[in-house]
Amino acid sequence: MTITALGYIGLGTEHIEAWRDFATAIMGVQAIDYPDGSLRLRYDEQPWRILVTPAEAPDLFLLGWEVAGPAEMATTIARLAAAGVAVERGSRELAADRDVEDLAVFTDPAGLRCELFWGGRLACRDRFVSPAGVAGFVTGEQGMGHLAVSTPRPDKAIGFYQDVLGFRLSDFIDLPLSPDLTLPITFLHCNPRHHSIAFAPAPGPHTLIHAMVQMTTIDDVGLAYDRVRNAGVPVSITLGRHSNDHMFSFYCRSPDGLEIEIGADARVIDDATWRPRRYDQISLWGHAFTAPPPPPSSSPSAHDRQTFPPSEEQ
Ligand SMILES: [Fe+2]
C-alpha cells in the first residue's frame, strides 16, 4: 500500500467571486485569498484542502495524493517509473505553495494532474472556524473527501490505481439511467473512507462528476440543505442515503455547474473484513435527480448564464 489519502484537490473556475460566496455561505468552509489570485478552501487543521483558481474551462484539474513519508514517496515513484509513467520532481517553490515537504507530479490515465506528496503542514494555532457554523468536517486519515471522475476508459484508470498506486476495490454500482442505459461505477479506497475516488464512463461536460465533503453531523447536512434552497442554488440530487458507502447527502451545483456532494454519517471500511459487492441502485432511499445537467462548458452562452445564486433555469 502506498497512497494513504486524497490530501487536496484543485478546481478551475470562471467565477472566483461567486465561488467565495458559495464556499463560505453554502459549504460553510473558509475561503482564503492567495497572492496568485486563487482561493484556498479550508475546513480542518490543514491550511487548505481545495484550491479554486481562475481557469477558462471549469473542472477538476489537480489531485494531491498523500504518502506517509519520503521512503514511501520513493517507493511510489519507483512503481510509477516501472509502469512507464513519467514522474517529475516538484520544485521547492511548488512544495511551499502546496504547504508540503516534498512532492512529485505525474498524470493518471484519466488525464488528471496528480501530485504525490508527504509532510503536509498543520496550522496549529490558526484554528478552523466555519463561517456558517458547521460543527466540523470528517478529514484526518480519511483525507479531504472523495471524487467521482469521468473517463472514457475507466478500466485503465481502475487498473492503474489498484496495480500501481495500491488502491483497493470498494465495490460497484450499476446506476440505472433509463430502461436501456446503465452507468457502471467503480469505487476505490486507500484508507477507511469508503472511497477516495470512483470512476465511470459518464458522458458530460466535465471530468469531475462530483466532489464530496463530509460533515460530522447529519444536522449540519440538513442546515446546508436549507442554505442551498434559501439561496436558490440548484439542488441536483435531493437528500438520500447511498447504497454502498451509506452517505447521507445531497448534491448541489457550484457557480460553474460542478457538482458538490455534501454528506455525513458514512460507514468506513475495515480491510480485514470488507468484501466488495455490486449494487443495483445508487441509493437506499431518496437522492432524486431534480435538475437538468449543466450545459457544456464549451458553450459561451452557458458561461454567460453563470451567476450566484444561479438562476432557476440552470
Ligand atoms: Fe459521492
Image: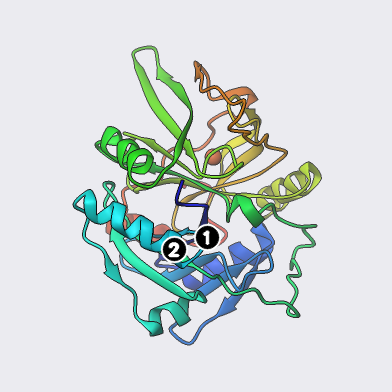
Q: Position of residue 203 (x, y in %)?
A: 31, 36
- Towards the viewer: 225 or 260: 260
Find out if the beta carbon at label 1 lies less than 8 Å from the nearest ligand 1 atom.
no
For disc 1, the neighbor class at 10 Å (few under 14, some 14 to 19, many from 20) is some
Q: Position of residue 226 (x, y in %)?
A: 74, 48
Tell me if residue 11 can be seen. Answer: no
Q: Residue at x 54, y 62 (%)?
A: 308
The mark tally for this picture is: 2
* Residue for badge 2: 71
Q: Give the number of the mark in front: 1 or 2.
A: 2
Question: Please, what is the three-letter code of the amino acid marked with disc 2?
Answer: Ala
Q: Which residue is farthest left?
A: 84
Tell me if residue 90 can be seen. Answer: yes
For disc 2, the neighbor class at 10 Å (few under 14, some 14 to 19, many from 20) is few
Q: Are marks 1 and 2 in contact (CB under 8 Å)?
A: yes
* Residue for badge 1: 68
